Image (cartoon, helix red, strand yellow):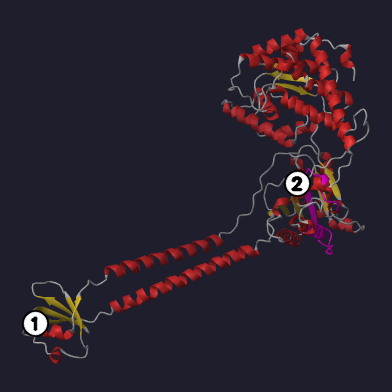
Amino acid sequence: MSMEKKSLKPKKTNGGDKKKSAVKNTGFVFLLVLIGLVLYASANQPSSLEEKPYSEVVARANEGNYSKLIISGSSVEVVEKDQDKPTIKSQKDPNSTIADDGIDISKVAVEYESADDGGIWLQLGMTLLPVIIIVGFFVWMMRSAQGQGNQAMSFGKSRARLYGNEKDKVMFKDIAGSEEAKQDLQEVVEFLKFPQKFESVGAKIPKGALLVGPPGTGKTMLARAVAGEADTPFFSISGSEFVEMFVGVGASRVRDLFAKAKKNAPAIIFVDEIDAVGRKRGSGMGGGHDEREQTLNQILVEMDGFDQGANVIVLAATNRADVLDPALLRPGRFDRRVNIGLPDRKDREAILKIHFEKKPLAKDVDLDALAAKTAGSSGADLSNVANESAILAARHDRKEITQADVTAAFEKVAIGPERKSKIMSESDKEMTAYHEAGHAIVGHVLPDSDMVHKVTIIPRGGTGGVTWFIPPEDKSYHSIIEYKDVLARMLGGRIAEEFIYGADRVTTGAGSDLQKAAELAREMIVNQGMGKKLRNQVFHTEEGMMMERMVHEKQFSDETAKIIDDEVEALITEAADRARVVISANPRKLDALKDRLLEKETVEAEEVLEVLDGSVLPKEAKLY
């Protein structure tokens, strides 16, 4: 696992943006023209004039009732006496003269104006304006429909992101740990770089490699490193991006993805979280017509179809290999399975050095000690510790990251942040101190338990206090005795409350401890074959979807289920009895650790060993 380097995707051309901008500008200009026409029409609208027959206008003009006649073509406007503007209008024959009409020019003044056809053009414009608006609306609708059609046509296209042109490529040397996985994937790199080397001796290039491991162990980074080492295009997509609500879209995207990869061959297709589409067929409600199953069928065909000459390798990552379809895992599809486990101490130290490489560290920072304490942590967890350390240093205005920052960051990531603002009563503090002291003394006394690392009554995360045990070294296997000691120390807090306050005064503070103890006991009986009556027998239970659990028949009888429940109960009862024996034999040490916790709130490992020095292990506690 290494520090992830961000890929620089090629910048897209802005031709589409320019086209959209031009369309928007055209629409804006059209709107301005429309507003201008409306304003012009409003400004040039003639005032309302009284309309009279032309014969009446001529008669009244000859009587001397009008001061002026304004003639413009066939239009006549009349200005009455004592008026400045026309108040009457009429229409005449445009081919007749005033002499023909019988107007006495001695009685009324006649003024001629050139005929203005603007009114006609305005009327024509106002007539055509609604037509233009309707036509423009339909044109816009057709363009919108065409755009949606283009989107519909691209709906079945693959959404895979293409890498390979970025400057800072991820290489194997950038990834700490996972040496075995890198060796397995190095052959994939050679297949891509030198295919003739293998084809010359009749070897077939593997179609795919499945990366299996817990979350945060660097599966995606290793896939990126394969592309970087081989210097080939890298198509990355998530399994969930194949499946949509429309039937056939997933299969279409699979076909398009493989077509793009074949055009860029040699190339790598990386499918992250492949279990989203690669689950066992026949478990869904849709049967063979389920969209997810159709997508899986298309993947199977593309990986091992008739086209055998394409130099395309599929890498996939998952942390649920047990739910994948057997046809996906057979040779010819995913030929290789690369297991990527949690890093050991040496790898953790190397990963921490990479993540702290560009961070200013004080001289007192001990990464080796931090690697020793972080057993069971993934590369992502260690990256988070490094980042939290830098955040704490910056928060306290320090230029360097100190050991205190690293320790606080590790504890924050591992057991949650401190909640010092939570106010607890004195009685609650005392009860919490007894509870955590009970965990500590049972874990300290029992020989096969891990070492106490820290005890605190400061609430952290969702707990009221924490007793933290860390193994002295990485372990691959655990014995029945070790598990029983773990069960006993889990119940030590509840038994300490019972010992001090009485059985009827125990609190809900042990709820999380009891849940974890029940899960561990059932794991021992069901999956590890560690029961007395059911020794060396395991009972698989379905962990898939509800429909899968309903369809698959339970693999053991109701009588066996009753025996399993009895075995779990016996383990819990035995663990409680052993914790009770230890606490009853060391009441003074219990009180001493309680007092120290009330005084200091947090007690480190060295001080816990000092306080609990001289604790005894009764003979009856050794019975298993």
Q: Nearer the viewer, residue 549 or 3?
A: 549
Gap between marks 1 and 2, in whole Å? 103 Å
The quarter holding residue 485 reads top right
Residue type pointed to by label 2: Ala
Q: Is mark 2 on a helix, strand or loop?
A: helix
Front of the two marks 1 and 2: 1
Q: Residue at x 56, y 67 (%)?
A: 145
Above/below status of 447 relative to 527: above
Q: Left or right of 353: which side holds 118?
A: left
* Residue 253 drawn in magenta: no
Q: Left or right of 228: which side holds 398?
A: left
* Residue 310 drawn in magenta: yes
Looking at the rendering, the stretch of residues picked out in magenta corresponds to 297-326
Q: Mark 2 points at which residue?
A: 225
Q: Nearer the viewer, residue 380 or 620?
A: 620
What x and y, as percent, mark residue 309?
83, 62
Q: Is mark 1 on a helix, strand or loop?
A: loop
What x and y, as percent, mark residue 471?
80, 24
Q: Name the residue under label 1.
A: 108
Q: Residue at x 76, y 52 (%)?
A: 277
Classify 10 Å Cα crowding around label 2: few (below 14), some (14-19), many (20 and above): many
Residue type pointed to by label 1: Val
Q: Which of 303 and 179 is in front in this view?
A: 303
Above/below status of 530 relative to 196: above
The quarter holding residue 304 reads bottom right
Check whether the beta carbons of the residues at disc 1 and disc 2 lie within 8 A of each other: no
What x and y, as percent, mark residue 413?
68, 30
Point out the image quarter for the C terminus.
top right
Classify 10 Å Cα crowding around label 1: few (below 14), some (14-19), many (20 and above): many
